[in-house]
């Protein structure tokens, strides 16, 4: 089961956060948003199909997020959780921790913003677009 999102880069993408990374519908980014890697996303959690949300809200569901820009890519793995509400209208956050809130897509992520491919981050800082594919296993 897959869900695809398009995101845009921004000159202030730093990708330095040590426990999360985020994509958002917001169109602007300050330097303090060091977990945000993609902006102006074309879909949010509100667009997830019911079956997709049900599968994500399972502790045994493995989540694979693939990020692709014109010159680089990265793959991040984590897990769903039974307490995920998947209801935030603008933000999608992947977390290394087990913290869950309305913005959380997955927990126990094997990467945070600081761990992502630096060529991918350079593309985003140069304003390139990014394909985000979320796969549930």
Image (tube, rainbow, N blue to C red):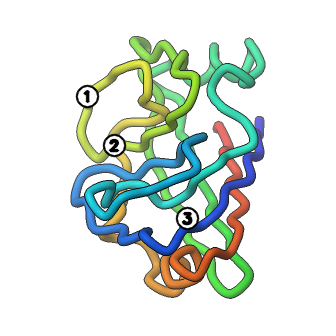
Q: At which x and y percent is residue 51? A: 74, 16
At a point 43% along the width and 28% down the height, the residue shown is 103
User: Counting residues from the N terminus, which is met first, the one under dot 3 or under dot 2?
Assistant: 3
Look at the numbered discs 2 and 1 and tell me whether their residues touch, using CB distance below 8 Å: yes
At a point 63% along the width and 13% down the height, the residue shown is 54
Q: Neighbour class for label 1 at 10 Å: few (<14), some, many (≥20)? A: some
**Residue 17, located in which quarter of the rendered image?**
bottom left
Badge 2 element: strand
Q: At which x and y percent is residue 10? A: 54, 68
Q: Neighbour class for label 2 at 10 Å: few (<14), some, many (≥20)? A: many
20 up-or-down from 55: above or below:
below
Badge 1 element: loop
Viewer-proximal residue among 18 and 76: 18
Q: Neighbour class for label 3 at 10 Å: few (<14), some, many (≥20)? A: some
Viewer-proximal residue among 82 and 120: 120
68 up-or-down from 136: above or below:
below
Badge 3 element: strand
Q: At which x and y percent is residue 13? A: 43, 69
Q: Quadrant of the N terminus?
A: top right
Which is in the foreground here, disc 3 or disc 2? 2
**Residue 32, located in which quarter of the rendered image?**
bottom left
Marks 3/2: CA–CA distance: 14 Å
Viewer-proximal residue among 91 and 10: 10
- Residue pointed to by mark 1: 99
At a point 74% along the width and 24% down the height, the residue shown is 47
Which is in the foreground here, disc 3 or disc 1? 1
- Residue pointed to by mark 2: 95
8 up-or-down from 116: above or below:
above
At a point 36% along the width and 71% down the height, the residue shown is 14
- Residue pointed to by mark 3: 75
């Amino acid at each position: 089961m897959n869900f695809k999102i398009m995101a845009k880069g921004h000159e202030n993408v730093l990708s330095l956060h040590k426990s999360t990374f985020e994509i958002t519908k917001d169109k602007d980014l300050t330097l303090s948003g060091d977990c945000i890697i993609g902006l102006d996303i074309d879909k949010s959690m509100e667009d997830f199909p019911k079956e997709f949300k049900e599968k994500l809200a399972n502790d045994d569901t493995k989540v694979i997020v693939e990020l692709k820009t014109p010159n680089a890519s990265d793959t991040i793995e984590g897990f769903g959780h039974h307490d995920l509400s998947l209801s935030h209208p603008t933000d999608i956050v992947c977390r290394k921790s087990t913290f869950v809130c309305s913005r959380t897509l997955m927990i126990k992520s094997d990467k945070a913003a600081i761990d992502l491919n630096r060529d991918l981050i350079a593309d985003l800082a140069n304003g390139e677009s990014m394909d985000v594919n979320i796969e549930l296993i």
